[in-house]
Image (cartoon, rainbow, N blue to C red):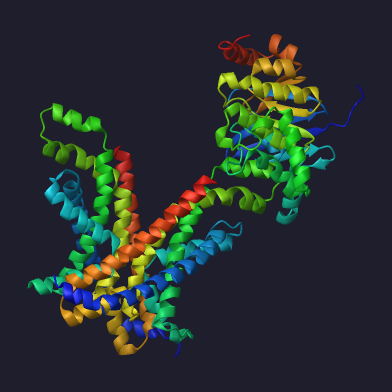
Amino acid sequence: MSAQKPFIDIRHAKKSFGTLEVLKDINLQVNRGQIVAIIGPSGSGKSTLLRAINDLDPLTGGEIWLEDKQINMDLPHRQYERHINEVRQEIGMVFQHFNLFPHLKVRENVTLAPKMLKGLSDAEANALAEEQLTKVGMIERIDYYPSQLSGGQKQRVAIARALAMKPKVMLFDEATSALDPELVEEVNLVMKQLAEEHMTMIIVTHEMGFAESVCDRVLFMDQGVVVEEGPPEVIFRNPKSERTQNFLRKHLAGQKA
Amino acid sequence: MGLDFSVIPKYLDIVLLGALWTIGITVGAALVSFFGGILLAVIALYAPAIVRWPFRIFSFLFLGTPLLLQLFLIYFGLVQIGIDVPAFVAGVIGLGLHFAVYNSELFQTSILAVDKGQIEAARTLGMSRMQALRKVVVPQAVRDVIPPIGNNMIALLKDSALVSVIGVSELTLSAQRAIGSTYRPFEFYVLVAAIYYIINLGMEAVLRRVERRIQASK
Amino acid sequence: MDYALMQRVFPFFLEAAWITILLSVLTAILGLICAMLGTAARLSRFRVLRFLGAAYVSVFRGTPALIQLFILYFGGPQIGIQLDAFEAGVIGLGVNVGAYMTETMRGAIISVDKGQGEAARTLGMSNWQAMRNVILPQAMRLMIRPLGVNLNTLIKSTALVAAISVVELTYTAQRYIGSTYKPFEMFLIAGLLYMIIIYVVGLAVTWADRKARLN
């Protein structure tokens, strides 16, 4: 594999809330098409790191680069707004609590942003929505309201909504943590499918089994630092650091293999 | 005609005296509205039907009509019945009654929201219904509803300006007296607005402290 | 209870009721406009606007509406503002109720789930696009009932203009109490008319609320 320029480049990322240091000098490079999992206990900073990538929770120090563009640039307000809104169109995000727009039908949830930001016509946007919703298996409910869907269905619609913007990378912030166990699998299947299509993905998750089966790389974070990283076979089966071992032991104790 | 705030100092003592009266009327009416509210709430919830209904109608009338109209009713109504009271008594009664009705709505909700287990515990100890109410339910209900009641008190302060219309000598009327001599309404009404604002801030500070005390005791 | 008298004076009260209704409508419209401006100011990213918005709410909620009316009507000429009593009533009450409505609107907007705004921004929408397409539509739904409460209070507060001699319901009641010495009867007529107005408005608010929820 030739030395590629990193697709996502996180350099010396730092984040503090007042005196509390949540991220302490994180460095991470993700290549195009890589699937990266970030695991760790709550409070480790993994969600904060993910949310810094599209500047939802801006860093207090360090830089984040997407290809050759710096995401967290220090610009005057109006220019910053224009810059970040453009950049965010290339980064898709899926939230733990879905955040579907309750006042819009499924169809409109998916077509809203493409129509408004990319100038798609009604016909084009509808075709796009149908394509994405078919992909996640939700085409039957295209004219339903979010309130009429189950958790797993809502999350799949949320994924379709993000995909409709044709992002270059997808961020998943504990996408299945708020779902009843029976509903987790349908979302995992969609994510697996995306992985097979070589979408660049960064996944914050508690699902060790899923992470192992889908990801190329796993990062274990604890207290604001990356403690260990490597391929899933190493991290999950043969972790080098004791902290990683402790975490996995505690975490896998209650889970099926 | 322009503005000239230098007329104020000469009449400051009249205005401040009016402010004292406003505070007095507010406190008096607040007490009436507080205890009256509890009484009305208990009647509305627990009195026999023949007593309840007239009170319900009366509450309905007082909730749905303007305070100023009610003040006219009480002031002129009392005179008609032959009870000749000074204007400020009519003012305190009118203000107090008006807010007693609003408070009673709050108290009713709060009393009903007190956990059923409380009454059960009190009754199993042998207390009568009235005793359980008085000693166990009402105290808790009152404590729970202090913030909105406090807000009603602050509204009462502002509405107290209306009693000037029936001739009560308080802050607003004192301004009108000064204006009668100086013909400078803007200056004096702004002064009076500022005084109301300051009293308002004071009441809000007191309310916040009371709320904090209650939170601490929970 | 002097029913004959009540029948005789009723037409005058009915006429006055129309003035009360007109006052309420105009004041409500002005109040909503002030509230939209006030809310925009309070949620603005400019500190000066936020301060002005907060000051507006604090001053107009913290002082008696009657005094605000007097400043405008009696004191206005001193600063070049000459209004007749009706105009002063609408403007004074409108700006006053706008302060209360500002807090109602602002409360509804901030109670919309934070995640909604985040999801919208993540898709690339600007702050304003997120507001207009995602947050405000949801806030509208939450606003209607509490604005209805504001409206209720507003209708009753139109009585204040009686103090500057606008011939509406309360002024008419006072006038006839003065000439007939029958406060109970006059109170009943005026009171009933107020309650009818409030009831009808209440129906409209409930209808609007239900319609908003069905969407």
Residue C90 location (% of width, % of height): 43, 74
Would residue B175 be seen by someone viewing this image from the given angle? yes
In this view, C125 is above or below B29? above
What residue is shown at x 38% (from left), y 83% (from top)?
Answer: C74
Residue B195 location (% of width, % of height): 34, 70
Image-based side of A13 in relation to C142, left or right: right
Q: Which residue is nearer to you in this view: C211 or B144?
A: C211
Q: Which residue is nearer to you in this view: B82 or C192?
A: C192
Image-based side of C3 in relation to C150, left or right: left
In this view, A48 is above or below C123? above
Q: Which residue is nearer to you in this view: A229 or C59?
A: C59
In this view, B24 is above or below B184? above
The quarter of the rendered structure image containing the C terminus of chain B is top left
List the single residue furthest toward the bottom: B1
How many marks the image carries: the answer is 0
What residue is shown at x 55% (from left), y 48% (from top)?
Answer: C138
Query: Which quadrant of the view contains residue C193?
Result: bottom left
What residue is shown at x 74% (from left), y 33% (from top)?
Answer: A132
Residue B86 location (% of width, % of height): 13, 74
Image-based side of C210 in relation to A238, left or right: left
Would residue A238 be seen by someone viewing this image from the given angle? no
Residue B208 location (% of width, % of height): 34, 51
The quarter of the rendered structure image containing the N terminus of chain B is bottom left
What residue is shown at x 56% (from left), y 61% (from top)?
Answer: C41
List the single residue furthest toward the left: B82
List the single residue furthest toward the right: A2
Query: Which quadrant of the view contains residue B67?
Result: bottom left
